[in-house]
Image (tube, helix red, strand yellow):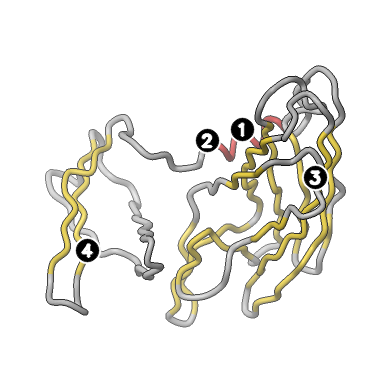
């Protein structure tokens, strides 16, 4: 789509292919560019903020869309810890058409919050039409793939394992303890914790054994 610009950045809807082909799912992305110092939020924003929320009402040949989240950065401002993105990020999208092979018309109303010293909410309308026809890589495929590679996935990672997860302490004052083992020494590690109850977790305290492993 065209860039939708603000005083603090811009956002657009991009697709990995210029046509729908015959695939049962389509690779797209929400591409954000922020001016220096401004950020948007991860799906679990932390102590403040809210993440981008797309509403796909008005789309045609559209069954569903799944939004993925590249690993975020951690920010600390005035004692508040938040998680999000600066500079540029693409949130990968997997769109399922109702009828594969037929044109797809995407319409979204996107709500998001961008912050620096202050926070400014935005609501933007984006649209993108993908015609029927053979699937050819677009100019935006590479950047979608690059950010998709930064999305954490469930299951084991080569050279890294979670050896132990435990909760210690009395009710109301529990501590979550996670023990991770790596083939290589950790460099600036971090841990992002989510749960279904919506509890918030601050920056973890780390201790290292065996040379930082």
Q: Which residue is mark 2?
A: 149
Please name which of the two marks, 2 or 3, marks the residue nearer to the observer. Answer: 3
Q: Position of residue 75 (x, y in %)?
A: 48, 67
Instruction: Please state, as top left, top right, bottom left or bottom right, where the C terminus lies in the image.
Output: top left
- Residue at 82 percent across and 42 percent down: it is 60
Distance in Å between CA atoms under marks 1 and 4: 34 Å
Q: Which sits earlier in the primary sequence, circle 3 or circle 1?
A: 3
Looking at the image, residue 200 lies above or below residue 157: below
Residue depicted at 84% across the width and 41% down the height = 105
Q: Pointer 4: what residue?
A: 176
Whichever of callouts 2 and 4 sits on the residue coming sooner in the sequence is: 2
Residue 64 at x, y percent in the picture: 65, 43
Q: Are marks 1 and 4 in contact (CB under 8 Å)?
A: no
Which residue does the image show at 63% across and 73% down from the upper left? 116
Mark 2 crowd level (few <14, some 14–19, many ≥20, 10 Å Cα): few
> Label 4 to label 3, Cα distance in Å?
42 Å
Left or right of 199? Residue 51 is: right
Q: Can you identify the residue that label 3 sits on? A: 106
Residue on which disc 1 sits: 145
**Cα distance between the residues tagged 2 and 3:** 24 Å
Which label is found at residue 211? none
Q: Is residue 145 left or right of residue 121?
A: left
Nearer to us: label 4 or label 3: 3
Residue 44 position, x and y percent, is 48, 62
From the viewer's perspective, is the residue at label 1 or at label 4 nearer?
A: 4
The answer to which quarter of the image holds residue 172 is bottom left
């Amino acid at each position: 789509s065209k860039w939708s610009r603000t005083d603090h950045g811009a956002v657009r809807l991009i697709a990995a292919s210029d046509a729908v082909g015959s695939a049962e799912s389509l690779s797209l992305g929400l591409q954000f560019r922020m001016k220096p110092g401004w950020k948007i939020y991860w799906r679990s924003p932390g102590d403040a903020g809210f993440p981008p929320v797309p509403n796909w009402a008005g789309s045609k040949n559209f069954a569903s869309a799944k939004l993925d989240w590249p690993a975020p950065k951690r920010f600390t401002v005035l004692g508040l810890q938040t998680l999000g993105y600066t500079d540029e990020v693409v949130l990968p999208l997997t769109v399922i058409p109702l009828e594969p092979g037929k044109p797809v018309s995407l319409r979204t109303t996107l709500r998001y919050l961008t912050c620096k010293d202050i926070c400014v909410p935005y609501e933007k309308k984006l649209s993108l039409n993908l015609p029927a026809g053979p699937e050819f890589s677009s100019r935006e495929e590479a950047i979608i793939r690059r950010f998709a590679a930064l999305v954490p996935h469930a299951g084991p990672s080569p050279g890294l394992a979670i050896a132990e997860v435990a909760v210690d302490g009395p009710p109301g004052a529990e501590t979550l303890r996670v023990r991770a083992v790596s083939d290589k020494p950790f460099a600036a590690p971090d841990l992002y914790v989510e749960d279904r109850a919506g509890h918030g977790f601050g920056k973890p305290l780390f201790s290292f054994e065996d040379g930082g492993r």
